[in-house]
Amino acid sequence: PAPRTVLLTGAAGLVGTLMRKLLPGYGYTLRLLDMRPIEDEPDAIVADLADRDALREAVRGVDAIIHLAGISLESSFEKILKANIEGTYHVYEAAREEGVRRIVFASSNHVVGHTPAPAPGEPPVPVGIPRRPDTFYGLSKSFGEDLAQLYWDRHGLETVSVRIGSCVPEPDSVRMLSLWLSPADAARLFHAALTAENVGHTVVHGASANTRLWLDLSSARALGYEPQDDSEQYAGKLIAEQGELDPDNPAHRCIGGPFVTDPPVWPH
Ligand code: NAI
Ligand code: 15L
């Protein structure tokens, strides 16, 4: 049966807030969790991923988990270790203990951030390219993908790891024209990842049908994802303001963009 009750971790964050609005439209009942309280959601579970008892209770009875919680930018190795590496392990252990069958894991383009960006006219990169994390953050997402593979192979717990490009309401850089995942397409992709059959552990790219797309979407489309949006509508304004990407600029050269030279740091 298709999953109906879904735990959304990281529900207070940017993507979590967008998905809280959009996923109920696909028929899901959401249970929300974040370490930060959510103003208009008094029933949301306020818990840190370090709290294994709280996590186990949070996953009890859900059909699936969308795991968004964690540090979403660069930070110290110690902080990343706790929130993203140990925290994701705790989510998988809770799911295993409570018999949850599927997790959708928010991975990131920063798993392959050091990969040179395709030049204009070159094909997008496939999901199978060697991983080249650009930060401890990207490394933690690479760990999450391996953890997902282990829990599939050892425990039969399924995961779709979504290497999200840039999921924001509107792209705000020329780089993001090639990576944008519109909120509506993100909901489409999460729905496909929750409902496709026999996914085992599948890695997909999370992006819209962008004219300048860098990320190949064939494994996402194989789940039934049909992106509807294209960042090209923002191209004129962004290129007029910022200029085209310069392949001689190290901050432009790779998929990870500024994360390879001067990564934005998690403020908390
Ligand atoms: P965000 O930083 O806005 O949200 C993350 C949420 O996780 C926050 O509400 C935070 O309070 C919560 N959180 C952090 N550590 C926690 C812990 N130890 N216990 C409980 N909650 C904790 O990030 P955003 O943009 O919403 O991203 C969601 C997920 O998607 C993240 O895992 C991020 O790495 C991933 N992602 C996002 C992309 C994007 O473009 N927005 C791109 C690629 C990946
Ligand atoms: C990410 O993984 C970050 O979580 C997000 O804040 C964006 O910066 C995105 O990647 C990106 O590469 O644009």
Image (cartoon, helix red, strand yellow):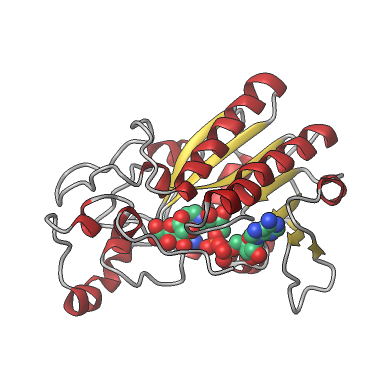
Residue 223 location in percent, x, y? 51, 38
The residue most toward the top is 154
Relative to 103, is 160 on the left or the right? Answer: left
Residue 266 location in percent, x, y? 52, 64
Query: At 73% across and 63% down in the image, what residue appears?
Result: 35
Q: Nearer the viewer, residue 217 or 103?
A: 103
Query: At 40% across and 72% down in the image, what residue appears?
Result: 170
Is residue 168 visible in the rendered image? The answer is yes
Is residue 9 visible in the rendered image? The answer is no
> Quadrant location of ligand 1?
bottom right
Question: In the picture shown, does residue 64 fall above or below 30?
Answer: above
Residue 186 location in percent, x, y? 51, 57
Q: Nearer the viewer, residue 40 or 73?
A: 73
- Quarter of the figure with residue 179: bottom left
Point out the image quarter for the C terminus: bottom right
Residue 189 location in percent, x, y? 52, 50
Point out the image quarter for the N terminus: top right
Query: At 30% across and 69% down in the image, what residue appears?
Result: 173
Question: In the picture shown, does residue 158 fall above or below 212?
Answer: above
